[in-house]
Image (tube, grey):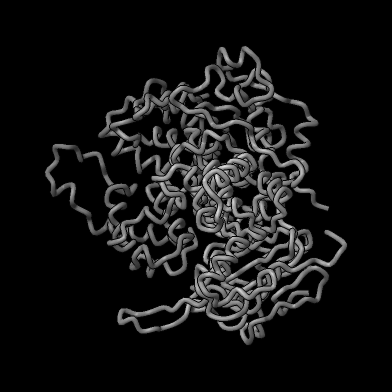
Amino acid sequence: MTTEPPQTILRISKLRKFFAIRNAWNRRIGWLKAVDDISLEVYRGEILGIVGESGCGKSTLGKTLMGIHKSSGGEVVFEDQPLVNLTRQESRRLSRQLQYSYQDPGASLDPRWKIRRSLHEPLVIHSGLDYQERDERVKSILDAVGLPQGHLELYPHEISGGQQRRVGLARILTLHPSLIILDEPTSGLDVSVQATILSLFLDLKKQFDLTYMFISHDLSVIRMLCDRVAVMYLGKIVELGETETIFNHPRHPYTQSLLAAIPVIGGERITDNFWLEGEPPNPSALPSGCRFRTRCPNALAICAESDPPLRSDWPHQQVACTLAE
Amino acid sequence: MTTDLLNVSDLRVSFATDTGVARVLDKVNFSIRRGEIVGLVGESGCGKTTLARAILGVLPVNSARIDGGRIQFQSENLLEMPSERLSKEVRGRTITFIPQDPFSSFNPVFTIGSQITDLMRWKSPLRNTQGLTRGSPWWSLRRYEKQRFKADRARVLELLRAVQLPDPEAILRKYPHEISGGQRQRLMIAQALLPEPQLIIADEPTTALDVTIQAQILKLLRQLAHDRDIAVLFTTHDLGTTYEICDRITVMYAGQEMESATASDFFNRPSHPYTQKLLESLPRDKERIQGIPGDIPTLISPPTGCRFHPRCDRADKTCADTRPAAKSIWTNHTVRCYHPNTDPEVHRELINQPYPDP
């Protein structure tokens, strides 16, 4: 960690994204709270991990930040500019700085376009460069992500999954963003390919001064890569803090169970002593009070009364649990 | 060995593709003993699913061809067994299957109960197959005696309780979309256990699930298989899950098996260069993360000799010429490599410090 105070690049306060649940007559019968009152700061130059199981709202959070989903409330400030309710021009200007890397880059590349055209596209939209200049920029970026020039002439289906991810990254990097939201960037890759992609992320971060928001369900990747982690459960952050602190002293029972569920080669077997039971409740019918109480082994009557806020009673760690100590 | 439940030897399978013949399995040797959980580990495209499907006899008819080898199950070669007998006595009876994707494995228009009843009608251990042949009248095939139905249903409910599904009778009345992925995978396990098989083939049963659900399912599967003395072939790409559940582990790469050992030996002394590279690529340390250089070879024109040699830093000329024979380096630990790395320092580096815990 650096000694100077960290500079905030993105500040999220009380961000909400609710999806309406409608019945057959299109009448609203409830809300699905995908992102519920999330407050978070991302510091310049760090890697912030967002971790949680499927359906916990981590991708919705990323997409709401990007403006792909319209937020239902709350504020987002990016580089000292509010990100909510922008006009099209403003949001286009800002979106050069803030980029989103999709979960499946293979599906986000046009199958009928050669890689060259896909890489040119963002520059055509966002910059006034002519073809020669664009091509130069594209080639230098391609070099940075470790792809040969020859790949410019290929179609997406002709390259492997790992290479498609590199193209997806190159496409984002051509605009020189300052913050990239990486949504499950290594899911579906083999470990050996995953390792090369992860080291590529680290190299690029150094080279281009990037900040990452790293959304993943894979705790071992998060642990290795991230400086800080936010653990999400059903639309809420339940624990937030520095990676080492959280992984060594998880205080929220959900984080504890997540950590207990990762197989560690050479460690204790989870199949001998895994204790969490049940499955996450239906997100459209949340339990009262703390959302984790239906599965929590320590739950008391008090947990059903109110939803515990994030408490920062510990150094480098905030926990949303009434009973945590 | 005589105690082997399943013994695959020199199995070769090829697929016809648009660009040529892909040799997906290249003389694979592999065995499972009675009541043992064997992990088959490899990256995507290494042939682990093809091997699983070859054992079940469900390779795609139009494109796949078995070029040679044997699949010895109990005392018979499955490759020579008449298909009628295979489907009546083996597939779905003594060998059952747990698929990777619990979401697309149920028919969405029937209730779970009716799908399980259907399974029990044909594959229940109580079913008397002796008198039934292709010549029997159709009503004898359709008949589902009331007594057997009752017994079968009791068994189904008992098993649903064994896989820890809450309120089994209500679940039987539900449609597949009404239950969660974890519950569907539990149902799949229950279905695989119903015919009282000797061997369950589980093809990446936990990849589609979240970590906490994966931990529950692994725990359940391990416990049920050991309690009932059922052998499991567990294919996966994740070395971590094999550590959790397996008694023995075989590593495959590009259609060839590379290393095979008991789980404890495997994780104490991983010796094949490929296994070591695989362990190195697990995310552990920011400073020394590295993948395996190069790409997975195409199976249409695979490298000669050991298929890993172009990416291996210990390879020499002999590796490119002929494929190494299985070499037993310790008891119950074989590698197919001319230059296994048996340095205890390296092993300690790879295994004993997986996470730099204080």
Residue located at (80% from left, 76% from top): A313
Residue situated in front as seen by the camera: A303 or A136: A136
Across the whole image, how many numbered discs are drawn on residues? 0
| Of the pair B261 and A177, the residue shown nearer to us | A177
Q: Is residue B211 visible?
A: yes
Return the x and y of residue B213 as percentages of the image width and height: 55, 59
Q: Quadrant of the N terminus of chain A?
A: bottom right
Task: Work out whether residue B317 or residue A144 is closer to the camera in this orientation and state it.
Answer: A144
Give the left or right position of residue B344, taking residue A295 as reference: right
Tell me where residue A75 sits by quadrant: bottom right
Image quadrant assignment for residue A143:
top right
A182 sits left or right of B354 in the view: left
Q: Image point 54% across, 77% down: which residue?
A: A85
Q: Is residue B100 above or below residue A258?
A: above
Which sits in the foreground, A280 or B304? B304
Q: Quadrant of the C terminus of chain A?
A: bottom right
Percent position (x, y) of residue B153? Answer: 33, 60
Note whether B339 is above or below B200 in the view shown.
above
Q: Is residue A278 visible?
A: no
**Residue found farthest to the left:** B137
Pinpoint residue A263: horizontal percent, then vertical percent: 65, 50
**x, y percent for residue A110:** 42, 49
Image point 65% across, 38% down: which residue?
A: B291
**What residue appears at the point 54 percent right and 66 percent down from the top-left corner?**
A92
Q: Residue furthest bottom?
A: A305
Relative side of A315 to A279, left or right: right
Image height check: is A51 above or below B321? below
